[in-house]
């Protein structure tokens, strides 16, 4: 039976029961177009803990992959395992929603996209925050010319780092993470929705030190190694002619997160935090003294709305919005920034991303449509 021959909610299995799974599972249980069956993890205790908390089944990874009823794998593993788990899901005949980044290198990311295409399956990639009402409203405003022609953007994400709050933060300071790969996808994905494809970057990076100390939880006081840049400053060129500057830091005592300012020929727009789904939009026109606040309306939904969009696309035989191809372009841009740090030169970005259609007015992940 093909996906389009099936009816009703799309059956979901979660693989990966780390911290982020709590948000996904809590949200997906409120989305009636998803039928959340089980959560699995290589550490069974973690899976049982999440399953018990939210009243679903725990299972092994092999059990989820072998379950013929499961149609969509929500892959919430650490970055180093994203491709392996997603590949296993595709080989089992299932669609896959991947946490970001899509992969750790371009080749494995492209192979994942090609494998899905060959199998006629969908692969999605976080973030799905740009599908929330905050950034959907931002894009509508920019598209209709509320700030004139968009020219430039400035983005900032800086704070002391996840070792200050995460109980097992080591993976966030290793390959595939750091502030650029952990937080960059939110900002870069959002900017591509306004400016289109990225074509080149120049970056510099540094680190406050080779180690960090866990500050919270049962392991507080443990020291671990840092293997990536924990401060990154990047210049971005877009195919549209727009340019942007980004700062991503785990080294700043001063917290500044969610700063996205888009300057146009007529006004500057301060967008909502791209790590969130809602929030106010502020606009200041040329010559004005004060910001004008534009409240955002709509159902935020939270992490997992990309899986809802996928589920509806699966049933209708369509493409979803937060696609692996978009995730691959963002990965390409982040790897180009890492290359630029290493070689101290501008690096060209070869991949391109297509425009993602806006969600229809009134789109609601908490509405049953299947």
Image: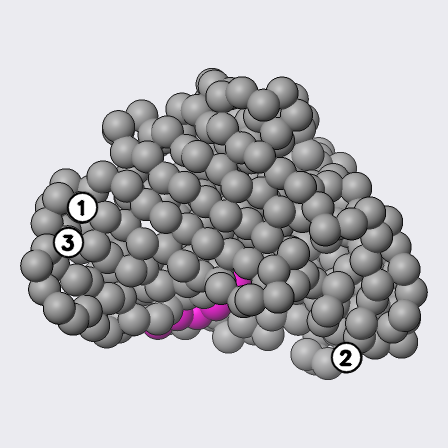
Which mark, residue 264? Answer: 1
In the image, 76 versus 35, the foreground residue is 76
**Rendered residue at 50%/48% (across/down):** 247
- Residue 235 sits in quarter: top left
Residue position for label 3? 267
Residue position for label 2? 52
| N-term mark: 2 or 3 | 2
| N-term mark: 1 or 2 | 2
Q: Is 161 situated left or right of 236 in this image?
A: right
User: Closer to the observer: label 1 or label 2?
Assistant: 1
Q: Residues within 10 Å of mark 3 (few under 14, many from 20)?
A: some
- Horizontal and vertical percent position of residue 53: 73, 81
- Horizontal and vertical percent position of residue 169: 77, 60
- Please say if 279 is above or below 145: below
Q: Which region is colored magenta?
A: 298-303
Q: Measure the C-alpha gap from mark 2 to mark 3.
A: 50 Å
- Image quadrant containing the N terminus: top right
- Please say if 316 is above or below 224: above
Can residue 311 be seen in this snapshot? no
- Horizontal and vertical percent position of residue 370: 41, 61
Q: Name the dominant secondary structure of the magenta segment.
A: loop
């Amino acid at each position: 039976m093909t996906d389009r021959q099936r009816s009703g909610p799309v059956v979901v299995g979660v693989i990966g029961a780390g911290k982020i799974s709590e948000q996904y599972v809590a949200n997906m249980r409120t989305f009636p177009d998803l039928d959340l069956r089980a959560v699995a993890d290589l550490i069974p205790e973690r899976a049982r803990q999440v399953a018990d908390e939210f009243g679903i089944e725990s299972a092994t990874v092999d059990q989820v992959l072998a379950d013929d009823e499961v149609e969509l794998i929500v892959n919430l593993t650490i970055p180093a395992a994203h491709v392996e788990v997603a590949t296993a899901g595709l080989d089992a005949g299932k669609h896959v929603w991947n946490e970001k980044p899509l992969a750790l290198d371009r080749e494995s990311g492209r192979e994942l996209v090609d494998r899905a295409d060959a199998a006629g399956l969908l692969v999605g990639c976080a973030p799905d925050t740009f599908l929330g009402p905050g950034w959907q409203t931002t894009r509508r405003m920019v598209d209709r010319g509320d700030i004139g022609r968009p020219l430039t953007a400035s983005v900032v994400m800086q704070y002391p780092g996840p070792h200050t709050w995460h109980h097992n933060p080591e993976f966030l300071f290793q390959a595939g993470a750091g502030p650029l790969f952990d937080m960059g996808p939110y900002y870069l994905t959002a900017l591509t929705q306004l400016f289109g494809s990225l074509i080149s970057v120049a970056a510099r990076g540094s680190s406050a030190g080779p180690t960090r100390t866990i500050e919270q939880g049962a392991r507080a006081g443990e020291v671990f190694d840092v293997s990536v840049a924990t401060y990154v400053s990047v210049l971005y060129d877009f195919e549209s002619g727009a340019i942007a500057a980004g700062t991503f830091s785990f080294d700043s005592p001063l917290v500044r997160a969610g700063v996205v300012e888009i300057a146009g020929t007529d006004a500057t727009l301060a967008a909502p935090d791209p790590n969130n789904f809602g929030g106010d939009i502020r606009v200041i026109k040329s010559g004005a003294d004060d910001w004008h606040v534009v409240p955002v309306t709509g159902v935020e939904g939270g992490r997992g709305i990309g899986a809802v969009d996928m589920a509806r696309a699966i049933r209708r035989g369509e493409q979803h919005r937060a696609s692996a191809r978009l995730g691959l372009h963002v990965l390409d841009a982040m790897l180009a920034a890492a290359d630029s740090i290493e070689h101290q030169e501008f690096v060209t970005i070869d991949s391109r991303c297509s425009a993602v259609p806006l969600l229809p007015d009134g789109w609601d992940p908490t509405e049953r449509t299947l």
